[in-house]
Image (tube, coloured by chain):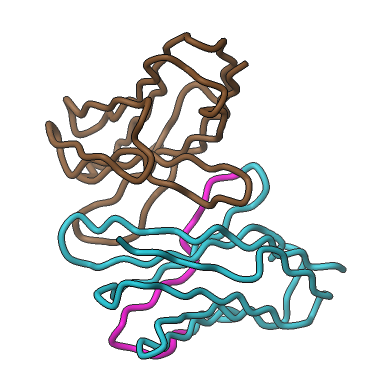
Amino acid sequence: NAGVTQTPKFQVLKTGQSMTLQCAQDMNHEYMSWYRQDPGMGLRLIHYSVGAGITDQGEVPNGYNVSRSTTEDFPLRLLSAAPSQTSVYFCASRTSGSYEQYFGPGTRLTVT
Amino acid sequence: GENVEQHPSTLSVQEGDSAVIKCTYSDSASNYFPWYKQELGKRPQLIIDIRSNVGEKKDQRIAVTLNKTAKHFSLHITETQPEDSAVYFCAASTTGGSYIPTFGRGTSLIVHP
């Protein structure tokens, strides 16, 4: 199993550009989440999904969209990038039978 | 919603010493408390967790204690080694429903050889 994968690993955007961060898992996990990690701020939840077709907002959802058309994939879309979205983004997943979250390797995003 | 406070933000110890990281939470309904370790440039990984029906859990050199009355829980690492150097995150959540953990801000542990 590859576990949780994320692409790209690094990305630089200009203010106003849009892009999609990809997240996929091959463990058949029902639950998937997106977090952002900023220095001194811990892991803050952006959006999450409890299954295909079901998504909900987390603590910091503004400026981001998600969709969950399949169990495996959970892309995060930045609609119009802003410097405040410079961060490291982690995708995570878990199965309904466990509370352990499996994190992807992260995407480091810089918005100039 | 839940609020998790974590202290200290940085902890520096000598190899072989013990390290203690403390967290408090606000929601009395929270009943699951995991700890994640994140090495530099890597992803967070679960190292130990505790549920509200126990007061302490140990796994080799690490242990977690929970005081539900005071709403705080702590991570204890004994006989620290340089490879314990990392950022540690505590979290709190309820086990019902969608289980969305709230994370603390992290503690950077530095173990000096």
- Chain B: give its colour: cyan
Q: Quadrant of residue A10?
A: top right
Question: Percent position (x, y) of residue B64?
Answer: 49, 81
Residue B53 on the magenta span: yes
Residue shown at 72% from the left, 81% from the top: B79
Q: Colour of chain A?
A: brown
Q: How many marks?
A: 0
Residue positioned 29% across, 50% down in the render: A94
* Residue A106 place in picture, x, y as percent: 51, 35
Relative side of B104 to B26, left or right: right
Whether the magenta-drawn stretch holds residue A2 is answered as no
User: Is residue B2 left or right of A43 when viewed as pictured?
Assistant: left
Q: In the picture, which quadrant includes the C terminus of chain A?
A: top right
Picture coordinates of residue A107, whole percent (x, y) = 52, 30
List x then y, in percent, for residue A18. 42, 11
Compare residues A51 and A78 and report the one nearer the observer.
A78
The part of the chain drawn in magenta is B42-57
Q: Residue at x 55, y 58 (%)?
A: B105
Image position of B55 with respect to B108: above or below: below
Q: Nearer the viewer, residue A30 or B68?
A: B68
Identify the image quadrant of the N terminus of chain A. top left
Tell me if I can see residue A3 in this picture.
no
Outermost residue to the right = B113
